[in-house]
Amino acid sequence: MTDFSILGDNAEWQKDFERRLRVSYTAAGLGAAAAERMLEDVRADIGDWTVAEITDAGTRVGYVAVVVADDDGALAGRIGDLRVDALHAGRGHEQAARDWAEGWCAERGAGRLDIRLTEPAGELFDDYHVRGQLRARCVGSPPEPVDGVTARPMTQAEYPEWLTSEKAAYVDDIVRAGALSPEEATRKSDRDFAKLIPEGLATPDNTFLVLEAAGEQIGTGWLKHGHLPGVTYGYSLYVQEQHRGKGYGRAAMSAGEQATLAAGDSTLMFTVWGGNEVAMNLYTSVGYQVIEESRSVGLPRSAA
């Protein structure tokens, strides 16, 4: 029988949790400094988590960590960790822990439960909706340019139209992934863009690109350098719909990688939203590994 008891001292669990995260981040290609920075962000939240020891007949078999917090005016739960020791895996403890976490969060008013996976979870979270993936690849050498495609800096005259389009696309991505309602997504978009590029094109450590082929604009790019030590974050590498299916997606990735190296970084990282399988397949084909995958399910389960 699987039982759960809330821990008073989380030190042993936290040490093991951070060790597992560090191994996962570096295995996905992040350097030691970048992995440590990601761990710092995790540590900032851990203090609010409730950690339960999973036991079977008095023997500890793993841990599960949960939290419920406000998310843009609504309560959302999160499974911060769910780990069953290899010796006890496959005996139903994982399913029991997932069910316990869902019940714990639902009892505290959460209307949604999120989890961020850093390693494959088998079938345990198959019925959770994929909201997005954080992907990265180490750019070891300058990428081969795509014939006929060039990338140039965006002009001030082009910026306002790009910003309007980019904010709308961001809202669409969030809604399609099932993360927020259109109204909530719009508020989030306004907040995020105001915070990320307060000075527009002049915002330091950002690159804004226009992609062209045969003298015609085919897409745009937006990258933030030094997002993590040695890591550029690609907020957007976009190919216009009428130009898709011509290999320009790879050209956009190549332009992003060139900008990454030019800024002195060695890794390009970005988020791909759930529901965008075409992009996921492209990124997999060119070697971008999944560092984290975010999933969610509605609570309570009967209303999901």
Image (cartoon, rainbow, N blue to C red):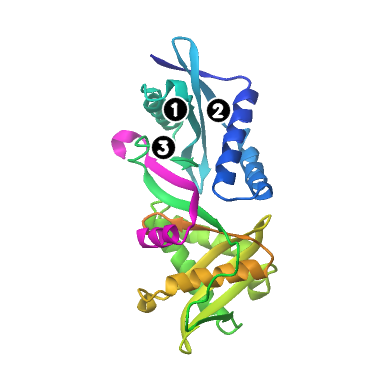
Q: Which residue is mark 2?
A: 50
**Can you tell which mark lies on residue 278?**
none
Q: How many C-alpha atoms fall within 10 Å of the one at disc 2: few (<14), some, or many (≥20)?
A: some
Residue type indicated by callout 1: Trp
Horizontally, residue 97 falls left or right of residue 303, namely right
Residue contact between numbered discs 3 and 1, judged by CB atoms under 8 Å:
no
Residue depicted at 38% across the width and 24% down the height: 96
Disc 1 secondary structure class: helix
Residue 64 in sight: yes
Closer to the camera in the image, 180 or 122: 122
* Magenta region includes residue 280: yes
Residue type indicated by callout 3: Ala
Disc 2 secondary structure class: strand
Span colored in magenta: 277-304
* Real-space CA distance between mark 2 and mark 1, rounded to the nearest whole angstrom: 10 Å
Residue depicted at 48% across the width and 24% down the height: 85
Residue type indicated by callout 2: Thr
**Residue 77: percent from the left, percent from the top?**
47, 37
Q: Which residue is mark 1?
A: 104
Residue contact between numbered discs 2 and 1, judged by CB atoms under 8 Å:
yes
Residue depicted at 57% across the width and 35% down the height: 20
Q: Say whether disc 3 or disc 1 marks the residue closer to the N-terminus.
A: 1
Q: Which residue is mark 3?
A: 121
Closer to the camera in the image, 97 or 291: 291
State which quarter of the image contains the N terminus: top left
